[in-house]
Image (spheres, helix red, strand yellow):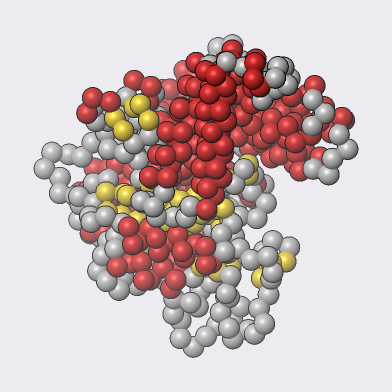
Amino acid sequence: MSAGGAEEDIPLGERKTVTDFCYLLDKSKQLFNGLRDLPQYGHKQWQSYFGRTFDVYTKLWKFQQQHRQVLDNRYGLKRWQIGEIASKIGQLYYHYYLRTSETSYLNEAFSFYSAIRQRSYYSQVNKEDRPELVVKKLRYYARYIVVCLLLNKMDLVKELVKDLSDEIEDYTHRFNTEDQLEWNLVLQEVAAFIEADPVMVLNDDNAVVITSNRLTEGGVPQLEQGMIVGQLTLADALIIGNCNNQVKFSELTIDMFRMLQALEREPVNLATQMNKPGTLESGEKPTKRENPHKYLLYKPTFSQLYTFLSASFKELPANSVLLIYLSATGIFPTGRSDYEGPYDFGGVLTNSNRDVLNGETVHKRNQSHKEMHCLHPGDLYPFTRKPLFVIVDSSNSVAYKNFTNLFGQPLVCLLSPTAYPKSMQDQSQRGSLFTLFLYNPLMAFLHTCGLSSMRRGLWDKCQDYLRKVYRDVGQLITRARSIDQAFLQFFGDEFLRLLLIRFVFCSATLRLHKIFRETRNYPETYPQLPKEDTIENPLVQKHILELASMLDVQNLFFNSTIDDY
């Protein structure tokens, strides 16, 4: 309590208010700190603890609103302390989003972070000679930026980056701190992240238009009447980023950031639908089923990756699919062995603080041993006991072509090109072209054509045309007579259907494009798709040439299959 008056002068009711506030504040901190000890994997263990933490923070927030004057006078409540409570609630919502993959919680996190800025809760921090308080403010900005990036609020991100830059400059000027380089690195990372998209969509005033690439109502071609496809549902996804030198912010590489959005529905505002996480008002249910649950793993070690993979596998419901997305540096075998098995083709890099030299080269003690810090195709074999959908974006993606389906469960691997033409390689820091096709096919198409900006009207026209292309590609896949049944078993799920259709569009585009001439420039699949029915189908090729014509870049594509096949 403040020393404003002797304790006996304080009315009993006001003293109780301060005591209750202190209790709630201590309890909230204790519960919040306990969140760190919860296992990061597994769906159930954490929910009740999160619920209790939310309850205490809700009470604390309402309590300080109802008793603000007493707390100001008797406790000496400062505005930055209110900001801290709001910031913690924002963090809770963000972590609830990470745990559940329910995009609507991002809106809740945003509303609290936004209120902190609008109400200037942290504005007085700079007047206090306490560097640790300024660091709280800087961390708040960094967290707010992550949420805004995930909600595609790019204009606001640019404002926040400017604010953060000013705050960092003031902080380093006032306090001789050791973390100046770290904070400047944060600024550099977010600046590079904002610039990662290779194409800008412009409106009539030359302002950049932000486009969202999450799944929207009507964004996936409907199945034809009577079409027999699997009833499997994508329930869990591991999104793994372990690329050297790729743009990142927080613990998200640009490839991870794009893929996680490709596996989410457009967020809705929860304010009218939910009163707290996990409970719906008046028995009302969301109209669409939820997003697949995701684990985001940035540069995991092999044991971390396997732990999360095992947890996902264990908790996978019946009739569900596990998706593994690997965006990682390729690890190549050093010698040829007499027997070529699932550990003889290399794989992709898993993290180790040792053994990695200059990014790409990994040294082993003995040439006859297999690389330890590598996820080999054989490492995934145990998990093919359940339906598995694998996407590998790597310079050694073809290692995963050498799969064997041991258990007869649906299994598909979508594999990136292993090399790109020189003009495309220069852009690899800004994310992979293959992942860009799976996330935003039109942007990827424009990028291959060397176009870096486009008017909103033409963009919308091309997107409308792409919807027609997707519909036709979907029909070709379901009607293909010689197609492996695994593709059709996954085709009932909207997310997987869209990924398969975008894959065919990507593969067909690169095969027609004049600068992609080597076999290693093309994506592949396991099992193989029937080319004549999908990626080399004349109807798909006609659509690609029509799209190129709309953009006036038809000279970049072969006009008929006989030109170079």
The answer to whether residue 364 is seen in the rendering is yes
> Residue 300 versus residue 534: which sits nearer the camera?
300
The part of the image, by quadrant, that contains residue 483 is bottom left
The answer to whether residue 64 is seen in the rendering is no
Residue found at x 74% / y 24%: 125
The part of the image, by quadrant, that contains residue 186 is top right
Residue sticking out furthest to the bottom = 338
Residue found at x 50% / y 15%: 66
Horizontal relation, residue 120 to residue 59: left or right: right
Query: Percent position (x, y) of residue 115?
Result: 56, 19
Query: Percent position (x, y) of residue 502?
Result: 39, 43
Residue sticking out furthest to the left = 226
> Residue 410 versus residue 517: which sits nearer the camera?
410
Residue found at x 22% / y 28%: 283
Residue found at x 74% / y 31%: 134
The part of the image, by quadrant, that contains residue 202 is top right
Compared to residue 414, the image places residue 343 above or below, namely: below
Horizontal relation, residue 285 to residue 93: left or right: left
Residue sticking out furthest to the front = 8
Query: Percent position (x, y) of residue 279?
Result: 31, 33
Horizontal relation, residue 478 to residue 220: left or right: left
Query: Percent position (x, y) of residue 311?
Result: 39, 60
> Residue 471 versus residue 81: which sits nearer the camera?
81
Compared to residue 174, the image places residue 181 above or below, namely: below
Number of marks in picture: 0
The quadrant of the rendering that contains the N terminus is: top right
Compared to residue 496, the image places residue 526 above or below, namely: below
Horizontal relation, residue 559 to residue 235: left or right: right
The quadrant of the rendering that contains the C terminus is: bottom left
